[in-house]
Image: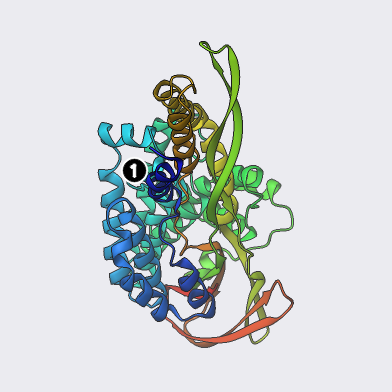
Amino acid sequence: MTKKHLFILLLPLAFAYGCAPLNFYSKIDPYIASGDYKSADAIVEKEKKQYEGMHELLYYFDKGSLLQMLGDYKGSIKNLDAAEDKIDSLYTKSATKEVSSFLSNDLNLPYEGEDFEQVMVNIMKALDFMYLDDFDGARVEAKKVNNRLNLLTDRYEGKNKYKDDAFARYLSAFSYEAEGNLNDAYIDYKKSYKAYLDYSGLYSTQVPDELKRDLLRVSQALNFTENYAEYKASFPGITYLKQNDLKSRGDVLIVIYDGMAPYKINNFITTPVYNDKTQQTNMIRVAFPKFTTRDYKVETAAAYLPGRQFNSFISEDISSMAVKNLEEKNLLISVKAIARAAAKYWAGQAISNNGKNEWLNLAANIYNLASEQADTRSWRTLPARFHMIRMHLPPGKYNINLKLKTLDGTVREETIPVKVREKQKKVIPVYAF
């Protein structure tokens, strides 16, 4: 076989393992950023075949997100249900597929989602239910988050740091309040507070002042005097409305989707392997996925009514979570990744008789370089982070003036008309991608 013929045979193999999947996001992203969600959804449908097979979960992710943006909350729930079913079905992987990925890369495995992405399925569904005023459905989804995180903790044998989700706990507490269940709401507010304390160290997301007000308000209403005294001492300067003052009021929660989620790229490292037969140390290349972040859009947000201002708080920073959780996961799976690259190296050495067969050695090297790719798939249609604004309002009709101060210094304003009934909970999405 000539050198020319060898390269002709190897090039398709190299491209097969070297090309990134789902190459249409460069078309989708500008539409989402400009608010043209219908056109973004049309591209997803047009490119549906690309999702088939190993990328099926990403279709449900993207459809769930885009239908939520379009206000089709029931359609969003349907696709996110399918995503949840797919994740569950992939929990036990096929041994055959694991072997094939071990000799190539994880792109040969069905995508099962990053840990935070699996959790976000239930959070996004909880939001869908809240937008439909179905707080029982929202509470069920928020509770599912705990089950999912327990499964992930078991998988990592307790070595993972992402063990609870503060945002999900807050949504659960809000939903309990909507159903008039103050006791269970208090339990989830407490768990949300504990999770936000962890968030401050993990993702630099601070405990929201609004949550501090909720803890003070509800612990006092339930006559948990010891807890109330602890919170009062821990939250100096925090003022709040007492539960008795809110009995006739409604509750408006504005959920702001800020910026676009990060996406993955290949991150290569080199590591030595020792060849007993040649008594030489060779360097091999190992691929790990790495999240690269996209800019947030919103610096601060506030809602205004005559004589009143309600400030936003960051409830979930998906970008920071994605980066930190993947770094942690890479540490936990580093042995597998290095073993995979080493296995391909040793296979190449065996085929080429430790490099003595020049052409087979060349073929093995080209294959190893081309096939050593990280799994760069991710849920790109999520926001970079969530902000929330909570407003306790007397019954009536309102035109809420929402002002979003963007990071480029401009201010985006919009008017949100809302009718508030006594004791009603109302959740409203605002998209600022």
Measured along the vertical axis of the image, is residue 341 above or below residue 179? above
Q: Nearer the viewer, residue 285 or 7?
A: 7
Image point 63% across, 70% down: which residue? 297
Indicate the quadrant where residue 379 lies.
bottom left
Image point 31% across, 50% down: which residue? 54
Q: Nearer the viewer, residue 316 or 55?
A: 55
Q: Secondary structure at mark 1?
A: loop
Q: Is residue 182 left or right of residue 214?
A: left
Task: Name the residue carrying label 1.
Answer: 109
Locate residue 12, reporting x and y percent: 38, 50
Whether residue 229 is visible: no
Locate residue 173, reporting x and y percent: 45, 56
Give the residue type at disc 1: Leu
Q: Classify mark 1: residues with Cα within 10 Å, few (<14), some (14-19) or many (20+).
A: many
Q: Is residue 43 left or right of residue 333?
A: left
Image point 53% across, 80% down: which residue? 34
